[in-house]
């Protein structure tokens, strides 16, 4: 497990799924629960979330629509779509529109889901490290250019 607490947001309109998720994973992760896409967005605005799990079939907005709607504002969290229904079009949309890392069928297997969340966090961490290293390279290059312009380098 990670030394850093992993913040996981799970969105599902079925309260018993939310309760089961919290019961199964509260000791492993920092759990944030939402019963709707709107509530999920409010949590994203208030908390630093690493992994988002969302149910596909919810009233008002599907899981894919939610994930697609937050891409510009919250591009970093790794996305997992969960559903009790097998729908190949939903899978394709999840990948193409919602940038989904994993598609999981309900009911979930606790050990499998724990592994998928951990792997999702690993991807999150690697992307962040890459982004930070790229930023450091850009800053170093800028400093080198400034020194070259001042003719301070041999």
Image: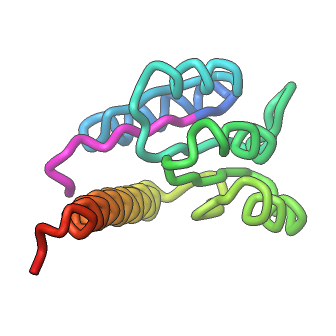
* Residue 125 visible in the snapshot: no
**What is the quadrant of residue 22 in the picture?**
top left
In the rendered view, would you say 135 is above or below 9? Answer: below
Residue 140 pos. (x, y %): 23, 63
Kindly identify the residue that appears in the image at 86 percent across and 62 percent down: 87
Tell me, yes or no, whether the highlighted magenta stretch contains residue 110. Answer: no
Q: Is 30 placed left or right of 80 in the picture?
A: left
Q: Is 93 placed left or right of 107 in the picture?
A: right
* Residue 95 visible in the snapshot: yes
Kindly identify the residue that appears in the image at 80 percent across and 55 percent down: 85
The residues colored magenta run 1-10
Q: How many marks?
A: 0
Residue 67 pos. (x, y %): 69, 44
Kindly identify the residue that appears in the image at 62 percent across and 25 percent down: 41
In the rendered view, would you say 85 is above or below 68? Answer: below
Residue 131 pos. (x, y %): 38, 59
**Where is the C terminus found, in terms of image quarters?**
bottom left
* SS majority, magenta: loop
Q: Is 146 placed left or right of 20 in the picture?
A: left
**What is the quadrant of residue 39 in the picture?**
top right
Residue 55 pos. (x, y %): 69, 42
Q: Is 135 placed left or right of 84 in the picture?
A: left
Please identify the residue farthest to the front as the structure is shown.
151
Please identify the residue farthest to the right as the structure is shown.
89
In the rendered view, would you say 74 is above or below 109? Answer: above
**Where is the N terminus found, in terms of image quarters?**
bottom left
Please identify the residue farthest to the bottom as the structure is shown.
154
Tell me, yes or no, whether the highlighted magenta stretch contains residue 5. Answer: yes
């Amino acid at each position: 497990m990670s030394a850093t607490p992993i913040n996981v947001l799970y969105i599902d309109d079925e309260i018993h799924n939310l309760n089961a998720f919290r019961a199964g994973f509260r000791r492993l992760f920092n759990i944030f629960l939402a019963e709707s896409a709107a509530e999920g967005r409010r949590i994203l605005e208030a908390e630093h979330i690493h992994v988002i799990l969302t149910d596909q079939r919810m009233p008002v907005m599907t899981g894919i629509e939610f994930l697609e709607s937050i891409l510009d504002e919250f591009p970093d969290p790794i996305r997992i779509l969960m559903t009790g229904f097998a729908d190949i079009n939903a899978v394709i949309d999840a990948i193409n529109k919602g940038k989904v890392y994993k598609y999981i069928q309900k009911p979930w297997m606790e050990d499998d889901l724990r592994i998928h969340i951990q792997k999702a966090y690993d991807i999150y961490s690697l992307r962040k490290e890459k982004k930070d290293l790229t930023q450091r390279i850009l800053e170093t290059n800028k400093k080198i250019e400034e020194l070259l312009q001042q003719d301070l380098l041999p």
